[in-house]
Structures are given as C-alpha cells and as structure tokens.
Amino acid sequence: MAAALGSLDAMSHMRIALVDSGKLSDIRQWEPPTDTYLPRTLQITASNQRFLERLGVWNLCFEDRIQAYNRAVVTDALGKGKVDLVALNSSSSDAAFMIETKNLVSGLLKAIDHNGSRIDVFERSKVSNWESAPKSDASPAATNWPTITLSNNRQLQARLVIGADGANSCVRKHANIGTYGTKYAQYGLVATLCLQEPISAAFQRFLPTGPIAMLPFPGGFANLVWSLDADLIQLLKSGLSSDIVNAAFRLSPVEMERIYDMLRSNASTEQINNEIAWRLQHIHSNDALPPVVAAIASKSSFPLQLRMVDSLIADRVALVGDAGHVMHPLAGQGLNMGLEDVQCLAQVLNEAAMAGEDIGIVLDRYNSQRYILNLAMQGIVDKCWHVFGARSSLVASLRSMAMTGLDQLPAVKSRIIHAFMQ
C-alpha cells in the first residue's frame, strides 16, 4: 500500500508512515538460498503482476525465482471429475505467477527505497495507543485526525490510517470494526517439493479431507499447499514424506484413509512407504497427474478460516488485504483480492487529492467498490470448499458430471480463467 501511495503525483505533498513490527531491513537485504525455495508462497494473477510491474516492484524481485504458468488441472478424488484449465485466448500466454512471499516483500521494500523519499519507515514498531479524533464537522484540520502512539513512544497524527496488517489487524480492532465468520477446523500444510522433472502447470486434487495443490517453481521445484483436518495436521507435519504426497495425488480416498490409519497407529516409515509403493504400482501415469515428488524440504502450517468485516472503513480508517477479508487458500485469491483493494483505494485517494478533497473522508467510495466484490469472492470459495468436501455419493456424482461437462466448454473455462487467474 505504501509503495502504491508513494507513486501518486497528486499526493506528492503528503508524507506516508509505514509501521511494521518486523525487522524489515533483514527482508530488504534478503539473499535467497541457491538450492531450495521457501514454503510460504503467493500466487499472483496476470493483472496484478502488471500492477506490480507498473509500480517498479516486479523487476526488483529475484525474477529467476518466479514461475509463470498458464495451465491448472483440477481433479476430484471422490467423484472422478476433471477440469483442465489452459489460458489460450488471453492477451498474455501467462495467466498467473508463483513467487515466494519473502521475494515479493523484498521487492516492495526496495521499491519504497528507490521511489519513496517521502515514506518514513518505522520497523520493529507496534501501535501502543490510539486516540480517535472527536466527531466534528469533518474539517480537514489536523485537530480532527487520529493520533497514533507507537511502541517506541513516537506519536503520529494522520488524516488517514490504512490497516494492511493482516488477519489479526490491530488497526481494525482500534477502529472497532466488527468481524464475523467461521473456522474450518482445518490447517494448511505448506512445503517445498523437489520433483523428478520440472513443471510449468498447477495441479489440484480435491480429497474428502481437503484439497491438495502442487504449484510450480523453476528448476524442478514446486510448492505444496494441503488442507488437512486438525487431527491429521500433527501426524503429517512430523510424518510427511514424498511417498505420502505422491499417494495423495494418485490413490483413492479409501486407500488414503488406510495410509492415515497407519500414521495414527504409529506404523514405521518403512511400513507406510511399502504400503504406498504396493498401491502405486497399479496407477498409470496420465496428463492429469503431476510429476513424481522426489524429496521434501522445509514445511510449515497455519489455521484456515473464513473471516469477513462489517465494513472496510471507519472514521479516517480503511482496511486492505487480510485485515478486511480472510478466506480459504484453495483458489489462491487472498493476496490478489488485497492487491485489488490497494489499486482501488489508491485510485480513490488520488482522485480525491487531485480534486482538493480531504482524503480521510472519501472512503465510502472505496467501500462501495470493494466490499461487495470481496464478499462475493469469499462466498464462492467457501461454497467450493463445502461442495467438494461433501462425501455423499450423490453429491460426488453431480460434481463429476459438472466437471466433465465444464471440461468440454472452452468458452466457459476461459471465463473462469479470466475471473480467477487473470
């Protein structure tokens, strides 16, 4: 958000404060490892990649560590349905990009250094106190601005406070913006995979226990994102192997339950691998299957939830990204929605500044454009999670019919690609 605001000529007379609890200097100077990729990654749509390119961020990332792709294969383990999404009719052959989170943040910080002479960075700082301005006649005078006290006792007075501070946003809490939603009783397990051969496509399989996805990176690496029930996450965090990942993309749900039972009964790694090898020998390779995983590097996990807000705005406060909406990662839309928030809010503020308006009191325009769109995307992803998580044979058959039918409709698939990837 700071990089976007720093690029606006109409706001060149205003100073911007970036407050972050992390040690940003370490991320700014990040030197990536040469033999692996980090497990926390992001999928970025083509339109948002172009936005980052316009900001001068993209070329400051380590571009040799970014993987473009234009194909996603989605399968249903229970219903046997398959959809092969290929971006053939787009203006660019690349529909989406995979990038490590730290790589993108490093590029953003470098862009702020290059172009943000009016951006003051307060790293390793938190908001310790917030004094809201008294309700008044919406005067632009500084006496009507909120006052923020940081953990280093520095005080900042701002005509606008933007919360881009994640799902547990302190800005949202200080502004008394309510939230509602649900926890999925699932965790996301992410890991770096080393493959037997390179890939340039994404593969996702819906299992009854949650979707598993393999997302491409350069040099024969991939990122694993696997949604798992709470009772399985601990077993697989400690017992995850390349054989188990290969099995999850290939074996039937009944066979996978057998593997889970062996994990629960503390079967040895050798016993589990022998069981998987025996079952995999009957599986023939096809274009719906990803390459074989040879090894697994670093991994981590995080809880999955759906979280909405009552509003994206309050008095001189706006929320962007996860501070304003949290969703299941199955469609890879979380960051993309956040970047669309940033673009919209930056445009609203730029237009207000050009017209000589107080940027702190024009936020209704942002909320009216983004709130419903965010809710709609959250609703679509949540419905997908429930539909593909249903174990009923009737629902599975209907899913299979729908996916098979969709796979035969290029025009409809093209619209889906445009909506979710471009």
Image: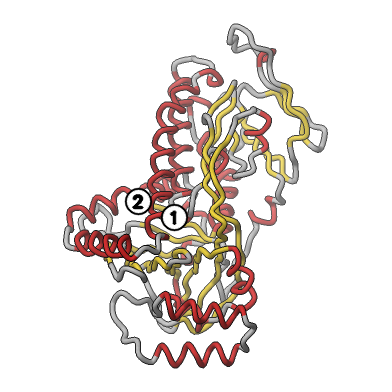
According to the picture, the residue beneath numbered tag 2 turns out to be 420
Residue 371 picture quarter: top left
Above or below 241: residue 395: above
Q: Find residue 265 and report its horizontal and vertical position in percent.
A: 62, 82
Residue 121 picture quarter: top right
Q: Are marks 2 and 1 in contact (CB under 8 Å)?
A: yes
Of the numbered discs 2 and 1, the one sitting upstream in the chain is 1
Question: Residue 394 versus residue 58: which sits nearer the camera?
Answer: 394
Q: Find residue 289 and report its horizontal and vertical position in percent.
A: 34, 77
Q: Can residue 131 be seen in this view?
A: yes
Q: Find residue 218 and report its horizontal and vertical position in percent.
A: 44, 71
Residue sitting at x 60%, y 70%: 299
Residue pushed farthest right?
153
Which circle marks residue 404 in the picture?
A: none
Residue sitting at x 22%, y 64%: 404
Above or below 205: residue 47: above
Question: Residue 76 versus residue 118: which sits nearer the camera?
Answer: 76
Question: Residue 131 versus residue 346: which sits nearer the camera?
Answer: 131
Residue sitting at x 20%, y 55%: 89
**Amino acid on which the number 1 mark rests in the picture:** Gly
Above or below 333: residue 228: below
According to the picture, the residue beneath numbered tag 1 turns out to be 332
